[in-house]
């Protein structure tokens, strides 16, 4: 695969980058769109992070100090929505845009114009959502899960804005998912058959199917909330013959697959990074593919583990308990394979690897607390306490977000053509690693001792735990500014990166020069 | 670009169809949920229609404790309570329990009572021959009323159910009722 062919080869269509703002507004180039997704995601990460700082500041001491309870509720709600739909999901879509065409030897995404749309509607969705915070009566304050009747009978007048913003986010991710599926199914280079695809491509393919299956259900749920609130329907209103518990069923039918949407691409990233810095092939490639598919299928059968306390019959409680525990099996297969890959490998500890290792350990802790929550009788005590908060932050922050950071450090040289400042990057890793555990680990104990989640005040015996968590929170927030610094510095300059800066790395993306030229693989590469 | 690549539009159409299908499925969950609950009794709802009393043998050997709870939803100031908190009956035996309601406000109001049974599976065996909850209840300002509920338990009720609780939550439906409807309702009362 000669790369010089790439550079001298001029197609009939434009090969130069348009300049100015127009380049970004009208671009259909997967790399441009990928970069925009990633920057957007980072801005959202800081915005949602600022809200988390408000939450941790209020919880620094018992009692009400800084904000009104109603505003506190808006912060927990919008923090959750922004992190899920604004930070984690767009980051993965950005990585998919950048990497999938290069990994499968395609010149671009299959549907480049739609790609432009799916990105550019996103900022509007979040402007609407954030704008609703400034309306009279405030923005959404019912939790990211918007349970009825909190989101119908008791919500503020701005709820319609919340609904529309979710609609737009949903349309954006559905378009993104369609694009990924069509790209992977139709644009692979000759010889790149399914079982040769990198795992990041595989996990994203499965994620895209999950998105297509459940985002429309979320759209339906918010639509029902809209008509219940403004048009007099009674989907969730018992007085009119509806049922608020049904809301939870519909929401979690979307919600549980959604949590896997936020972790499957991580599995793909980690499966690329660990072999690269272990200098061994990934252990059990095929089992990784099957495990991912198994997790995705099972994720449709476990939604009610979020609803153990709603008064389900024992039979249903048992069914959902066992199905939930079953998911730990394919997840365990993955963890085993990563560890087996490292076994007797020649490991080195560059920043992407450090994040990947932290992912394996800390995500496993999150999986274990998930298993504890899956035990129905035990969940009666843990439900809606800080134990749940600890669980999902371990899987989402030290899971999904750490994998996104690992991916950024892994591919930054390819994106920018420069090596990043490794000292700064390692500082970012170690400060994040320590602070994130100071932030979230104590929450397990607060939860076990009965501290409820989503409440701005708490009993005084929880004061110490919360103070520690808040300090960890501030430190974690500040650490992310180091990340911003590293990235900006790396974009601006630095040691020139080679086409393949990591000697153990594998995949087509490393056969093109760094930075990756604006157009790659216009002539499909040969895959042996 | 190579031209042997498959046609994208077929795949895109299929995927869009799936999206539309899943959106419809989200709404289809609503009737599915109702049917599922009705068949399994999972959420403790009782039927909205009167059961026709069928001559069944009264099972004198068993006694089941049936308890009554009432609750007002937010914002309805009525007094609403059962005339008796619990009755002991044999499966198959028909019983009438009265519920008392009064409207202490100075305006005419309409309410709807929504039943729920615990344990949920017992809802399949509680048959209401007559119930005020089948219809909305109008009450003129300051008026009160006695509302009957006639029921029997299916003799097939599982042995492990010795106590069941029937709870009514009362919702204010005045805002959803027009002036004419209100007049009509109060006249038929
Ligand atoms: C072994 C795997 C897992 C198991 C057994 C598990 C189990 C559970 C259970 C039982 C709950 C409900 C707790 C309650 O509300 O009482 C829960 C909540 C949650 N889980 Fe997991 N989980 C697992 C993995 C994950 C992963 C991978 C993610 C996301 C990347 C995730 C994200 C969440 C979130 C966001 C919630 C809280 C939702 C909310 O109420 O706001 N979980 N988990
Ligand atoms: Cu779940």
Image (cartoon, coloured by chain):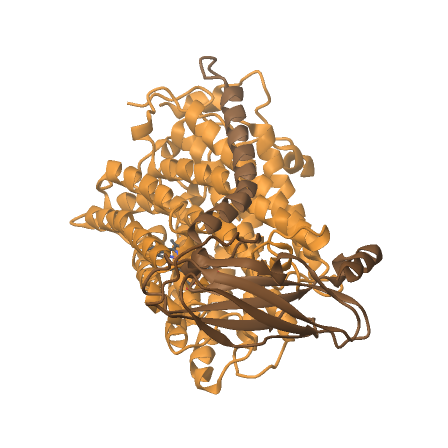
Chain colours: A orange, B brown
Out of A25 and A320, give the one closest to the viewer. A320
Is residue A273 placed above or below A117 in the rendered structure?
Answer: below
Instruction: Give the left or right position of residue A510, taking residue A246 as reference.
Output: left
Instruction: Give the left or right position of residue A222, taking residue B119 as reference.
Output: right
Q: Quadrant of residue B176?
A: bottom right
Out of B55 and A289, give the one closest to the viewer. B55
Q: What residue is rendered at 50% in x and 25% in y?
A: B14
Q: Quadrant of residue A104?
A: top left
Could you say where residue A13 lies in the image, as x and y percent from the top left?
59, 19
Instruction: Give the left or right position of residue A137, taking residue A199 as reference.
Output: right
Out of A389 and B53, give the one closest to the viewer. B53
* Residue A180 appears anywhere in the view: yes
Number of numbered tags placed on the structure image? 0
* Residue A425 appears anywhere in the view: no
Taking the image in four quarters, ligand 1 sits in the one at: bottom left
Instruction: Give the left or right position of residue A451, taking residue A502 as reference.
Output: right
Could you say where residue B173 lies in the image, as x and y percent from the top left?
71, 61
- Name the residue furthest bottom: A460
Could you say where residue A456 lies in the image, as x and y percent from the top left?
56, 75
Query: Where, quadrant-wise, is the N terminus of chain A in this rendering?
Result: top left
Q: What residue is rendered at 51% in x and 55% in y?
A: A248
Query: Where, quadrant-wise, is the C terminus of chain A in this rendering?
Result: top left
Out of A357 and B86, give the one closest to the viewer. B86
């Amino acid at each position: 695969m000669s790369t010089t062919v790439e550079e001298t080869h001029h197609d009939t269509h434009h090969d130069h980058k348009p300049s100015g703002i127009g380049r970004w507004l009208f671009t259909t180039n997967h790399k441009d769109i990928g970069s925009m997704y990633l920057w957007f995601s980072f801005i959202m990460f800081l915005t949602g992070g600022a809200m988390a700082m408000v939450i941790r500041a209020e919880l620094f001491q018992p009692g009400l100090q800084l904000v009104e309870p109603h505003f506190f509720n808006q912060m927990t709600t919008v923090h959750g929505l922004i992190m899920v739909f604004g930070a984690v999901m767009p980051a993965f879509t950005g990585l998919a845009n950048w990497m999938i065409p290069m990994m499968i030897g395609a010149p671009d995404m299959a549907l480049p114009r739609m790609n432009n749309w799916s990105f550019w509607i996103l900022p509007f969705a979040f402007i609407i959502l954030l704008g609703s915070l400034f309306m009279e009566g405030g923005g959404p304050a019912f939790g990211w899960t918007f349970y009825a009747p909190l989101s119908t009978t008791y919500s503020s007048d701005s709820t319609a804005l919340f609904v529309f913003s979710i609609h737009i986010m949903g349309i954006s991710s559905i378009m993104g998912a369609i694009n990924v599926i069509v790209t992977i199914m139709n644009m692979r280079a000759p010889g790149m058959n399914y079982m040769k695809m990198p795992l990041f491509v595989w996990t994203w393919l499965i994620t895209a199917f999950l998105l297509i299956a459940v985002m429309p259900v979320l759209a339906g749920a918010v639509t029902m909330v809209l008509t219940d609130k403004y048009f007099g329907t009674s989907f969730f209103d018992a007085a009119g013959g509806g049922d608020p518990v049904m809301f939870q069923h519909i929401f979690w039918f979307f919600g549980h697959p959604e949590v896997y949407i936020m972790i499957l691409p991580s599995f793909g990233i980690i499966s690329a990074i660990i072999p690269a810095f272990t200098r061994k092939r990934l252990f059990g490639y095929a089992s990784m593919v099957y495990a991912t598919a198994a997790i995705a299928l099972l994720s449709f059968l476990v939604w009610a583990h979020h609803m153990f306390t709603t008064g389900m019959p024992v039979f249903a409680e048992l069914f959902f308990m066992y199905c939930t525990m079953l998911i730990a099996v394919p997840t365990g297969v993955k963890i085993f394979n990563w560890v087996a890959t490292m076994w007797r490998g020649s490991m080195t500890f560059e920043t992407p690897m450090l994040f990947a290792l932290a992912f394996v350990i800390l995500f496993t802790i999150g999986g274990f607390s998930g298993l504890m929550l899956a035990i129905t009788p035990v969940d009666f005590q843990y439900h809606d306490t800080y134990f749940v908060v600890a669980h999902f932050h371990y899987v989402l922050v030290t899971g999904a977000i750490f994998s996104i950071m690992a991916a950024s450090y892994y591919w930054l040289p390819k994106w920018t053509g420069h090596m990043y400042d490794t000292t700064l990057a390692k500082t970012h890793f170690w400060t994040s690693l320590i602070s994130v555990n100071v932030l979230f680990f104590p929450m397990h104990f607060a939860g076990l001792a009965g501290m409820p989640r989503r409440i701005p005040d708490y009993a005084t015996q929880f004061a110490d735990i919360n103070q520690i968590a808040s300090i960890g929170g501030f430190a974690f927030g500040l650490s992310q500014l180091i990340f911003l610094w590293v990235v900006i510095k790396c974009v601006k300059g630095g040691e020139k990166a080679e086409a393949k800066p990591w000697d153990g790395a594998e995949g087509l993306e490393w056969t093109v020069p760094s930075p990756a030229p604006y157009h790659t693989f216009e002539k499909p590469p040969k895959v042996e | 670009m190579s031209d042997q690549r498959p046609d994208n539009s077929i795949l895109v159409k299929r995927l869009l169809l799936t999206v539309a299908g899943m959106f419809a499925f989200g709404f289809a969950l609503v009737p599915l949920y109702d049917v599922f609950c009705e068949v399994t009794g999972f959420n403790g709802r009782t039927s909205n229609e009167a059961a026709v009393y069928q001559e069944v043998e009264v099972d004198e050997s068993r006694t089941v404790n049936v308890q009554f709870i009432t609750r007002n939803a937010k914002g309805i100031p009525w007094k609403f309570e059962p005339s008796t908190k619990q009755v002991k009956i044999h499966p198959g035996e028909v019983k009438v329990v009265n519920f008392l309601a009064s409207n202490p406000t100075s305006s005419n109001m309409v309410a709807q009572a929504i039943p729920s049974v615990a344990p949920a599976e017992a809802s399949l065996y509680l048959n209401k021959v007559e119930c005020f909850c089948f219809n909305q209840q109008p009450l003129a300002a300051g008026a009160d009323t006695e509302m009957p509920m006639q029921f029997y338990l299916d003799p097939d009720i599982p042995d492990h159910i010795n106590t069941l609780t029937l709870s009514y939550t009362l919702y204010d439906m005045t805002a959803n009722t027009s002036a004419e409807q209100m007049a009509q309702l109060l006249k038929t009362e």
